Image (cartoon, rainbow, N blue to C red):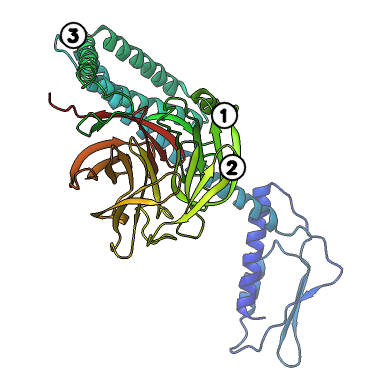
Amino acid sequence: MKPGFSCVLVVLGLLHSAIMSVWGVTTTFPSFPTPVSFPTSDFSSSYPPDSAWSTSRSKSQSFSNFTGNRDDRGVCQCSVILPDNTFPAVRVERLEITAQTISKKFEKELSKVKEYVQLISKYEEKLLNLTVRVSIMEKDFISYTVLDFELIKMEVKEMEKLIKQLKVGFAGSTVIVDQLEVEIRNMTILVGQLETLDKNNVLAIRRQILALKNKLKECEEASKEENLPPPPAPGSCAHGGVMNVSKPAVVQLNWLGFSYKYGAWGRDYSPQNPGNGVYWVAPLNTNGRTLQYYRLYNTKDDLLLYTNARQNQITYGQGSGTVVYKNNMYVNWYNTRNMAKINLTTNRVDLSQALPNAAYNNRFSYANVGWQDMDFAVDENGLWVIYATEASTGNIVISKLNDTTLAVLNTWHTKQYKPSVTNTFMVCGVLYATRTLNTRIEEIFYYYDTNTGQEGRLNIIMQKMQENVQSINYHPFEQKLFVYNDGYLLNYDLVFQQIPQ
C-alpha cells in the first residue's frame, strides 16, 4: 500500500471520531455487505517498512475489518468496511445557511437602528435649538414678525413628519420616539400661543393697517368711479370718444359649452326700440369656421338661466363677425364673399349680396382668430362692415352699409394691417382696434374716425378672462361691449370723454 493512502485513512478516521464525539454518539462499525476496494497506481519507490505499516495501522484503530494485498502487477488492493453512520453534510449545510440568514437580518436591523439613532440625535438638537429660540421669544420684549413664527412652524412641522416616519419604521420600543412626539406637539401649541399673545400686539396692528390700506384703496377706486364723467344719453354721440373701459363682467358660458371657443354674442339694437332687443348667442362649430346654430333670449334672466330660448339653424354662416340689427342677423355666407341678411322671425335668408373686392376664406382674418374676413358692426349710425382687400394689401377697410339692401354707402381705407389686430368695434363712426398684450390683458391701441378721416394711437387696457378674444360687439343704448372670450360671454361698460363746455 502507498503511504499516501494510509494518511488518507488516518485523516478519515480522525474526522469521523471528532464528528461523532461532537454529536455525542458512541460509534460501532458494522460491516457492509460488500467491501469497497480502492485501487492504487504502481509504487514509484520501495514499499515502506513494516514499522511504517504498523504505525499507520495504530493511528487508524477506529477503523476495523479491512485487509490489503498486492496483485501480480504490483497494484495494492485494500478492502475497507465503512460504518453506516455517514457524515451529516446536509444538516451542516442547512445550519450554515441559517446562520448566514440570521447574520444578514441582524446587520440590516443594526443599520436601521444606527440610522434612526442618528436622525433622532439630529432632531433632538433641532428641538433643543427651537426650545431656546421660543424661550427667548417668551422673555424678550422685542416684537417678532409673522415670518419668525412661520419659520418656526415650518421646522416643527418638518420634525412632526419625521417622527411619524420613525414610528412607522421602528419595530421595537418607541419610548424615545413617543417622547419626541409629545415635545413637538407641545412646541406647536406654544408657538401658536406666542403668536396669539404677541406682547406688543404688533402683528395685530399690522393686520389692521393692511385692512385699512385695502379699505382706503377701495375708497379711492370708488371715488374715481364717482368722479367719472356722466355718461352721455343712450344712443347719443355727445362725447369725445372712448376714454376707458370697466373690468369685465362674466355673464355666462355659451350654451354649447367650453369646447365652443369661437363665436359671437350681443343684443339686437334698433333706434326705434333701443332698449327692448333680444339677446343672441352664436357659437361656431368646433372647427372655428362654421356658424350653424344660434339662440335668442327675450331677457337677460333667460340668458343667465338658459331658459325660454329659441334655437335656430342656418346653413351656413362663416366666422365670428356676426351682428344683429333691427331684428336681422348679418353674417358672411359660407365659402363666399357674400353678406347674408337673416330674418330672425322667420329664420330665412332675406338677402345675400357680394361685398365688392373683399378678401375671404381666411385671407386677411384677425390675429388669433380664423375665418373672420368680414366683421360686421353696429353703432349709433347704423350698420358697418370691416374687412380687407388685395388692393389694400391687407390693411383695414371700413364700409358703411345700407341695412336694407346691403349696398355699400361709403368706404374708408386705413393704414392699419388687419391680421395684426385681434378685433374691432365701432362707436359713433369711430373704429377701435384691439391687440393682445398677454394672456389676461387686451389693449385698445388704434382708432380711425370716419367723421374726420383721422387715425391714431390709444392706450386703453381691457382685462379678459381667457386668452383669445373672438368677437367684440357694441350696443349703443346700453353703451356696453359684448365680448366673446374663448367661449365665455363678457360685458364691459364704456367710459366716454366729456366734451369741454
- Cα separation, mark 1 vs mark 3, equals 64 Å
Q: Residues within 10 Å of mark 1 (few under 14, many from 20)?
A: some
Instruction: Name the residue carrying label 1.
Output: 306
Kind of residue at disc 2: Asn
Out of 42 and 69, give the one closest to the viewer.
Answer: 42
The CA span between labels 2 and 1 is 20 Å
Residues at circles 3 and 2 in contact by the CB criterion of under 8 Å: no
Under circle 3, the secondary element is helix
Cα separation between marks 3 and 2: 82 Å
Residue 78 visible at all: yes
Which residue was labeled with disc 2? 347
Q: Residues within 10 Å of mark 2 (few under 14, many from 20)?
A: some
Give the mark nearer the N terminus: 1 vs 3. 3
Rendered position, 326 above or below 392: above
Locate residue 378: give its quadrant.
top left
Horizontal side of 318 relative to 363 (left or right) equals right
Q: Position of residue 264 (x, y in %)?
A: 45, 42
Q: Amino acid at mark 1?
A: Tyr
- Residue 248 in the image: state x and y as whole percent: 35, 31
- Where in the figure is residue 498, as x and y percent of width and height? 18, 27
Element type at mark 2:
loop
Q: Which label number is shown at residue 139? A: 3
